[in-house]
Amino acid sequence: MPQITRRALLALGAAGLAAPALG
């Protein structure tokens, strides 16, 4: 299921960007 993979990858990227911003 490529849609689930893309969604997970997007969520992972968002978390990676948000983590340092939140500290």
Image: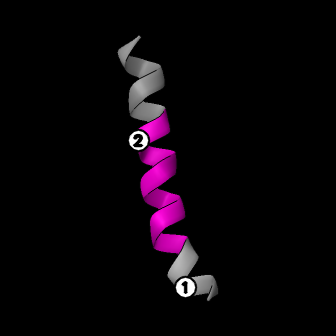
Residue 9: x and y, percent?
41, 41
Badge 1 or badge 2: first in the primary sequence: 2
User: For residue 20: magenta?
Assistant: no
Q: Please indicate whether residue 14 sits to the left or right of residue 2 in the image.
A: right
Q: What type of secondary structure mainly makes up the magenta span?
A: helix
Residue 20: x and y, percent?
52, 83
Q: Which part of the image, by quadrant, shows the C terminus?
A: bottom right
Residue 13 to residue 17: above or below: above
Corner quadrant of residue 21: bottom right
Extent of the magenta region: 8-18
**Label 1 – label 2 distance at C-alpha:** 19 Å
Residue 12: x and y, percent?
48, 51
Which residue, as the protein is rendered here, is positioned at the far right?
22
Residue matched to label 1: 21
Residue 22: x and y, percent?
63, 84
Disc 2 on helix, strand or loop?
A: helix
Q: Check disc 1: other Cα within 10 Å, few if <14, some if 14-19, many if 20+.
A: few
Q: Please indicate whether residue 16 sits to the left or right of residue 6 in the image.
A: right
- Residue drawn at (49%, 59%), measured in percent from left and top? 14
- Residue drawn at (36%, 17%), measured in percent from left and top? 2
The amino acid pointed to by label 2 is Leu
The amino acid pointed to by label 1 is Ala
How many labels, in total? 2
Residue 10 to residue 3: above or below: below
Residue 10 to residue 2: above or below: below
- Residue drawn at (45%, 71%), measured in percent from left and top? 17
User: For residue 14: magenta?
Assistant: yes
Disc 1 on helix, strand or loop?
A: helix
- Residue drawn at (43%, 45%), measured in percent from left and top? 10
Which residue, as the protein is rendered here, is positioned at the far top?
1
Residue matched to label 2: 9
Corner quadrant of residue 5: top left
